[in-house]
Image: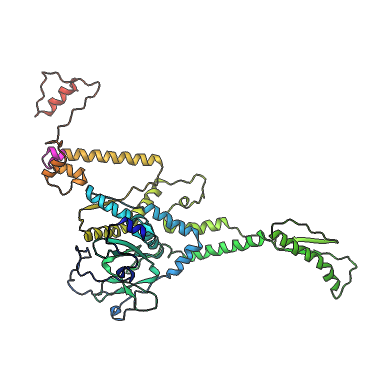
Amino acid sequence: MARAAASYPSGYPSRTDGWLGSGRIRPLPTAPATVPTAPQYEPLQFGATRPSYDLAGIAASLGSFWHVPPRIDLNLVVKLRESIPLLSGAILRMKQLVGWPEVEAAPRVKRDIDNFLKMLPNCRSQQGAKPWGQTHLDNCFTFGRAHTEILLTATRSDMHSLVEVDPRTTAFRPLPDGYNLAVAQWQYGGGTPVLLSPELTITTVNDLRGDDPQGTSMIADIPFVADIYTKMLRAMGSTWDRFGTPTYFVKWNPPKDWNDPAGSQVKTIMAAPQAQMQQWALNKANGKNSDIFLAGDFTIEIMGAQGETLEFSESARTIAEQMCARWGIPPFMFGFSWASTERMSTAQAKAVTEIIDNLRDMFEPSIRQLIELRQAVTGGGGKFTLKWPAVNLTDLLDVARADLMEQQAEQLKLENLQSAGRLGIWSMEEIAQQIRPDLEGLSPEEIRARLPDLAEAVPEPVPVQVAGLKQPPADAGNPADEAVSRLLAYNGNGH
């Protein structure tokens, strides 16, 4: 992409490059740095247990086409999401609430990582790691798992881009070691599934249940309820088709002495009203107004107008509540105004915050894998941490109260650090490292060079002057070893 080429230095392959265009990842014979992988230790003994999908323990020897069988139909969840806007709205809200973390590190390391995350091409049409995170979470919530392939540059000296993989084209294949799984993708032509490199694949699994490694879709628990809801919507649509575009019938009341056994005269009389009704419908479809003129005793009525329609709103709300309960989000966050004074209580806000924190814990290892791999490939190094923004779900009063508590906690932390410094437990340099994350890993001399005005010792606390209390006279004395005498001197009245 032209945008990616303009954002990165020279040496990045183009779309016509053989290594990228082949769609395969060659082995890395000479890597510029060690790529972080899972610890490869030999187990103390072979596992005695077997997963439920391979109780015989022979899955790895069944061929390259065998994979862990899925519990749900991934195409079904896509159809459900396309049919019910509530499900798409729920996934959108969850992605927005999870958000993206802020990188905290030394200024040089932070600047390097932030620039990389900001300019990283992904999904062939996006730029930036944050949009990739939204796409990755969308697949994870919809299908239960998400996979991203990392493409390195031709020189293997940096990360080129990310490619999100459709989970419907992938599966887990057991490996001969009896524990690990590889991600395989079925590609065009029906050939042998292609294994994705574990070191260059980011996998995120949502709501892993039991020993199923494929996770659980957030739509997997509601097919039955969703089927009822779609039937109600379909029936309501059919009702509106009937009443919105009604079907008319024309009735002619013949005279009492009418005698037409063959019905030929009735056909002749009804021909004119039939032609006028057809012309009237055609004019209405074309946006024209026209009238109908009939001679005789004719009645024009709407077919089925006298029938009763089924109640929809309360039943639909009951079904929608079942789906909202699956997500754990209050209904008004989906735009449902089921109560005129509905608002989020503190208990609801706490519950939703815990849900979002759990989802962030699920997604954070994938972000760390991305950043650590890039730092290892480029040789950048440096420690970093990920700080997630606070989930703001409550009213302004609760937000202000939370801010006050955070400030009080910071004040208590400072007081504890000062007490530890006066007792000689920590030096001033160590206290500075506790307060300033960018000083981590520096020696005391380097900290002094960075902070030339740093005090040599923790200053003594200044006595608080309280209005209305008598101050001790200059000659009253203040023995350091007699606390009672000191209190009497400061109180001045002996009480």
Q: Residue at x 33, y 69 (%)?
A: 21
Q: Nearer the viewer, residue 101 or 490?
A: 101
Q: Is residue 259 among what the camera can see?
A: yes
Outermost residue to the bottom? 62
Outermost residue to the right? 257
82 displayed left or right of 457: right
Q: How far from the left and from the top, in percent, is residue 230? A: 53, 63
Residue 81 painted magenta? no
Q: Residue at x 23, y 24 (%)?
A: 466
Q: Which residues are magenta?
A: 419-428
Q: Nearer the viewer, residue 73 or 11?
A: 11
- Quadrant location of the C terminus in the rendered image: top left
Q: How far from the left and from the top, in percent, is residue 359? A: 34, 57
Q: Nearer the viewer, residue 220 or 272?
A: 272
Q: How far from the left and from the top, in percent, is residue 473? A: 14, 18
**Residue 352 sits above or below residue 13 on the image:** above
89 displayed left or right of 27: right
Q: Quadrant of residue 217?
A: bottom left
344 displayed left or right of 56: right
**Residue 434 sits above or below residue 379 on the image:** above
